[in-house]
């Protein structure tokens, strides 16, 4: 692809990030979820997955979905530096996804976690995978985190026993704004890793292959009666 000079100026400099190695997680209902990194040329199916939830006010899906839509679109168009997206898929159908980015080699900026299929701790599993990527694979020193919903506050800020950076505001503030920034250090992560980070690697080829081509959900429990028309 030929990139003109103006487009080059509009793109941020980026750090070469190590790829996230796929893993599989057996959920409480026995289904197998493949967790893998998504590539820019797959952004369309992510946007298709997110967009119906922008109109769902319950549990703050609207603000999370709207912001995540912008994050994925910005990543796709090379307008956000050092961003990565992980997806959870069952038989190729997206059941959840997370966005995040690296500020520099040492600091990660956790963006959003969105769950489509609820009641199986899919969001918690994907958030843990995101932290695994930041702190283990990318070897960062800490990840900055905020919450936009009560569920997120309880599941991530409280369960991980994060350090509050409230006393360091405004010097330390998450780029999403919101509640005072909390920080997950490698020490705090290691203390909960055994309980939070699950999954098996390598993923057998026949299971990994089910997530080669991602599909947007046909139904959303958050939107009663919703049926996606398949082309």
Image: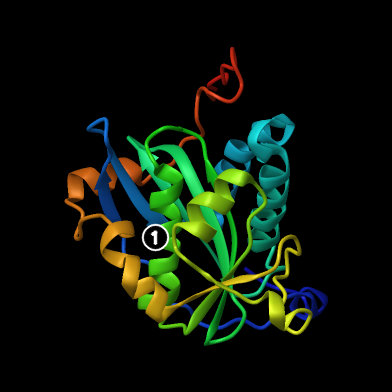
- Given residues 206 and 53, the one toward you in this image is 53
Identify the colour scheme used.
Answer: rainbow
Which residue corresponds to mark 1? 129
Question: SS class of the residue under badge 1?
Answer: helix
Residue 135, quarter of the rendered image: bottom left
- Given residues 123 and 43, the one toward you in this image is 123
**Position of residue 96 in the picture relative to residue 153 (left or right):** left
Q: Position of residue 98 (x, y in %)?
A: 52, 54
Q: How many marks?
A: 1
Task: Point out the residue furthest to the right here.
Answer: 6
Quarter of the picture containing the N terminus is bottom right
Q: Position of residue 108 (x, y in %)?
A: 55, 76
Task: Point out the residue furthest to the top here.
Answer: 225
Residue at horizontal 66 percent and vertical 51 percent from the top = 68
Tag 1: Cα neighbours inside 10 Å, few (<14), some, or many (≥20)?
A: many
- Given residues 214 and 20, the one toward you in this image is 20
Residue 201, quarter of the rendered image: bottom left
Task: Point out the residue furthest to the front here.
Answer: 167
**Position of residue 96 in the picture relative to residue 107 (left or right):** left
Q: Is residue 123 above or below residue 157?
A: above
Q: Is residue 102 above or below residue 71?
A: below
Residue at horizontal 68 percent and vertical 39 percent from the top = 60
Residue 113 seen anywhere in this rendered image of the structure: no
Q: Position of residue 4 (x, y in %)?
A: 76, 75
Residue 61, quarter of the rendered image: top right
Residue at horizontal 56 percent and vertical 50 percent from the top = 152
Q: Position of residue 106 (x, y in %)?
A: 52, 87
Residue 178 seen anywhere in this rendered image of the structure: yes
Residue at horizontal 62 percent and vertical 40 percent from the top = 50
């Amino acid at each position: 692809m030929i990139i003109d000079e103006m487009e080059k100026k509009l793109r941020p400099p980026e750090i070469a990030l190590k790829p996230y190695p796929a893993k599989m997680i057996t959920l409480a209902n026995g289904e197998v979820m493949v967790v893998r990194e998504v590539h820019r040329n797959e952004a369309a199916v992510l946007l298709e997955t997110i967009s119906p939830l922008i109109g769902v006010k319950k549990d703050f899906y609207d603000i999370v979905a709207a912001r995540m839509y912008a994050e994925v679109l910005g990543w796709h168009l090379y307008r956000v530096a050092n961003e990565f997206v992980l997806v959870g898929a069952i038989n190729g159908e997206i059941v959840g996804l997370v966005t995040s980015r690296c500020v520099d080699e040492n600091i990660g900026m956790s963006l959003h976690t969105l769950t489509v299929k609820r009641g199986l701790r899919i969001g918690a599993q994907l958030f843990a995978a995101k932290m695994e990527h930041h702190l283990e694979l990318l070897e960062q020193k800490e990840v900055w985190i905020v919450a936009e919903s009560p569920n997120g506050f309880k599941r991530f800020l409280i369960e991980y026993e994060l350090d509050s950076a409230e006393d360091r505001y405004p010097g330390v503030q998450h780029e999403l704004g919101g509640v005072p920034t909390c920080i997950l250090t490698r020490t705090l992560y290691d203390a909960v890793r055994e309980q939070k980070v699950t999954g098996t690697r390598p993923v057998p080829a026949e299971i990994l292959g089910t997530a080669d081509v991602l599909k947007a959900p046909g139904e959303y429990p958050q939107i009663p009666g919703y049926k996606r028309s398949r082309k």
